[in-house]
Image (cartoon, helix red, strand yellow):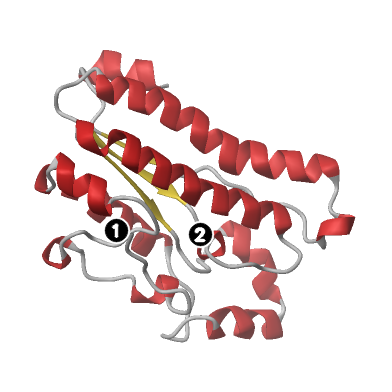
Amino acid sequence: MVEAGVERFGRLDVACNNAGIGGEANPTADYSIAGWHDVIATNLNGTFFCMKHELAAMLRSSEGGAIVNLSSVLGQVGFATAPAYVAAKHGVVGLTRSAALEYGPQGIRVNAVGPGFILTAMTEKHRVDPEVDAMLRGFHAVGRMGTAREVANSCCGSARQRRLSSPARSTRSTAAISRAEDRRARPAGPASLLDWASWLRI
């Protein structure tokens, strides 16, 4: 996939790693082994494998690059009955932090965006129950769930900062739940996404 993109466009400037599944809803002792492996393979291993090849492609270019990983608010907190998802998203945050330190000096910025509960097909099935729907909306300060467009805006904001940041500055502040290094460059929007966990800066 990465090589095909480089072959067509000449180099890789920006990558966003966004594949993910929710997994089963069971406490840790009852969680199936197969279910655990499925979530970790998709949400964590998938991000690692993509980053491995994206970073290699960016290193071949003198232009640097920007990688945005999709974590979750559950990459910062615990959540009952979702041990695999929570573990995978914590892993994405750790992977992002490590890569940011490793490749920032070479002009490659690595960030993660950690949305709250978003209106997607993954959450739709849980919103059928009015009580669950109210609970999910209640997690957010603005009283609603976030939208995919808001998450996309946050990812694009992180990617656009690539040419605004020096390698040294990237090393200092590129690493965790995405927050613009420069508030002036941060796109207006998704205050609803992280509310109770808020945006964090490393």
Where does the image place residue 1, in percent across and percent down from the top left? 42, 21
Q: Considering only vertical position in the picture, is 145 above or below 5?
A: below
| Residue picked out by circle 1 | 153
Q: Nearer the viewer, mark 2 or mark 1?
A: 2
Is 182 left, or right, of 38 in this rendering? left
Where does the image place residue 159, in percent across and percent down from the top left? 24, 46
Q: Considering only vertical position in the picture, is 70 above or below 82?
A: above
Badge 2: few (under 14), some or many (20 or more) residues near its Cα, within 10 Å? many
Q: Nearer the viewer, residue 123 or 109?
A: 109
Q: Amino acid at mark 1?
A: Asn
| Residue picked out by circle 2 | 72
Q: Considering only vertical position in the picture, is 73 above or below 90?
A: below
Q: Quadrant of residue 40?
A: top right
Separation (CA) of disc 2 from disc 1: 15 Å
Element class at badge 1: helix
Badge 1: few (under 14), some or many (20 or more) residues near its Cα, within 10 Å? some
Looking at marks 2 and 1 on the same chain, the residue that comes earlier in the sequence is marked by 2
Where does the image place residue 95, in percent across and percent down from the top left? 47, 42
Q: Residue at x 14, y 61 (%)?
A: 185
Q: Amino acid at mark 2?
A: Ser
Q: Residue at x 33, y 35 (%)?
A: 102
Element class at badge 2: loop
Q: Residue at x 51, y 59 (%)?
A: 72
